[in-house]
Image: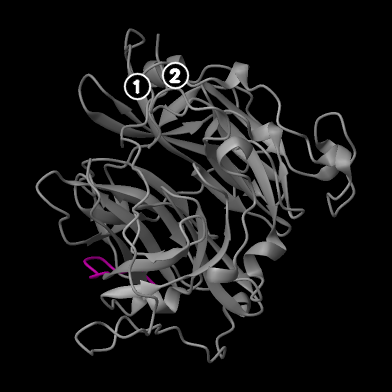
């Protein structure tokens, strides 16, 4: 049987408290400063950026395909942790499709596309939707040989390998993370930069790397660590690795939202990350609640959709159920309750499965999902256990209910139910 696997072991939250930004260290020197630019002069929402500039032709020499992210024009970024690089490819767009795949078990299809249906262990590293053609792309690894490949989902519900041997591309190496190598856990395109979250394989060392647009071959990324307020721990932390990144624009300002192997949802400005300072301070917009982990996250014009690990009772040290959660976009962009004043969306401890804030709700259509991506503003593609499905987030299309736009009616809250059908296969650990 081919099971979905995610290799990076679950990392606990870092609990070592550090000084808040701008405080005095014991030796009398000034601690980390908040270097955010508050000028507000830029207007990224009005720009049509060029994402790729100087490229080379040929094989980019990928050693791994761990993360995928499409820019708005279809330029593809690939996180190659084994090669310690971010690679940007001018991928041919192909034909536009309105096909919405519904695949109950994608793993045999991946094995067939690799050319060997007898493969018994395949790992899917990421999925992504092309913003122009709506085609779904899948990054997978054949574990018996360590071979990686990029696939498209065809209209006849088969998978085809994308030939990357002769492509226009730009490769940007980043500093090695240590002897054990690295993993690119997340990628996001803002209107001004490409940002990646990188962590040492099986370790806790991590960094954010940022490349200004347009990307050119052999660009040197800015590198920084991050600092944020952990609402559940009630302290400032340098934190564990970033697991998810999502870009958005609000009030003419470019932002990135990040979640860690812990619970805060933290926003950064790409301009701060591009400075490459030793430490970049983010703003905690809200906290998902104690003993949670966001596996993946997307932002639409009206909500933040996430698949959450740790919503139900834990068995030993293994969290064994994934659940979908929606938070109003207004909570992400607000500025009145940040950091020490940020609020929890979901309870912790005995209330770990209860929505406790009116701007959050369960979104059961994402139950069981490990990877998600936006096809458009109202459609999400999700890898749910072995299945690949497209989910309509329009209120009228939610299962069994017709919800108003504000999602405030009680029937739209979808109280926690048993997720027995979405139990994680034995041996699987969250990335």
Which of 417/389 is in front? 417
* Residue 365 percent coordinates (x, y): 69, 32
Question: Does residue 284 lie above or below 390 as drawn?
Answer: below
* Residue 217 part of the magenta-drawn span: yes
Question: Does residue 75 lie above or below 101 as drawn?
Answer: below
Question: Does residue 259 lie above or below 275 as drawn?
Answer: above
Marks 1/2: CA–CA distance: 7 Å
- From this viewpoint, is residue 213 visible? no
Label annotation for residue 122: 1
Mark 2, secondary structure of its residue = helix
Which of 293/349 is in front? 349
Quadrant where the N terminus sits is top left
Q: Left or right of 404: which side holds 373?
A: left
Q: Residue at horizontal 57%, vertical 29%?
A: 312
What's drawn in magenta, residue-wise? 214-221
Q: Residue at horizontal 33%, vertical 7%?
A: 118
Overall secondary structure of the magenta section: loop
* Residue 254 part of the magenta-drawn span: no
Quadrant where the C terminus sits is top left
- From this viewpoint, is residue 260 visible? yes
Contact? badges 1 and 2 (CB < 8 Å): yes
Mark 1, secondary structure of its residue = strand
Residue designated by label 2: 107
Q: Residues within 10 Å of mark 1 (few under 14, many from 20)?
A: many
């Amino acid at each position: 049987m081919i099971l979905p696997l995610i290799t990076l072991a679950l990392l606990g939250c870092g609990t070592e408290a550090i000084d808040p930004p701008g405080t005095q260290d014991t030796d009398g020197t000034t601690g980390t400063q908040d270097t955010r630019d508050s000028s507000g002069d830029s207007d990224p929402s009005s720009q049509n950026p060029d994402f790729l500039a100087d490229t080379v032709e040929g094989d980019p020499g990928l050693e791994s395909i761990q993360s995928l992210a499409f820019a708005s024009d279809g330029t593809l970024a690939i996180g190659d942790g084994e090669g310690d690089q971010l690679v940007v490819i001018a991928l041919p767009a192909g034909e536009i499709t309105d096909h919405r795949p519904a695949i109950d078990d994608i793993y045999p299809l991946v094995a067939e596309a690799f050319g060997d249906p007898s493969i018994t262990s395949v790992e899917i590293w990421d999925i992504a939707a092309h913003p122009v053609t709506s085609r779904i792309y899948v990054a997978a690894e054949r574990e018996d040989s360590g071979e990686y490949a990029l696939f498209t989902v065809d209209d006849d519900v088969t998978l085809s390998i994308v030939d990357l041997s002769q492509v226009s591309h730009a490769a940007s190496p980043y500093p090695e993370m240590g002897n054990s190598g690295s993993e690119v856990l997340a990628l996001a395109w803002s209107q001004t930069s490409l940002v990646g979250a990188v962590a040492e394989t099986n370790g806790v060392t991590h960094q954010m790397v940022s490349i200004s647009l347009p990307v050119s071959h052999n660009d040197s990324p800015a590198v920084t660590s991050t600092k944020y307020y952990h609402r559940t721990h009630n302290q400032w932390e340098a934190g564990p690795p970033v697991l998810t990144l999502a870009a958005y624009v609000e009030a003419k300002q470019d932002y990135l939202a990040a979640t860690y192997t812990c619970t805060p949802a933290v926003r950064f400005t790409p301009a701060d990350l591009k400075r490459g300072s030793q430490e970049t301070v983010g703003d905690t917009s809200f906290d998902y609640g104690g003993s949670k982990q966001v596996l993946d996250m997307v932002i639409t014009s009206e909500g933040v959709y996430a698949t959450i690990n740790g919503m139900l009772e834990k068995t030993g040290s293994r969290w064994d159920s994934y659940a979908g959660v929606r938070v109003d976009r207004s909570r992400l962009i607000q500025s009145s309750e940040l950091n020490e004043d940020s609020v929890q969306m979901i309870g912790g401890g005995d209330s770990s499965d209860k929505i406790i804030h009116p701007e959050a709700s369960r979104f059961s259509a994402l139950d069981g999902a490990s990877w998600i991506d936006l096809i458009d503003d109202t459609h999400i593609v999700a890898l749910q256990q072995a299945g690949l499905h497209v989910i309509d987030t329009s209120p009228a299309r939610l299962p069994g209910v017709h919800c108003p736009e504000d999602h405030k009616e009680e029937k739209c809250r979808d109280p926690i139910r048993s997720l027995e059908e979405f139990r994680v296969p034995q041996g699987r650990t969250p990335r």
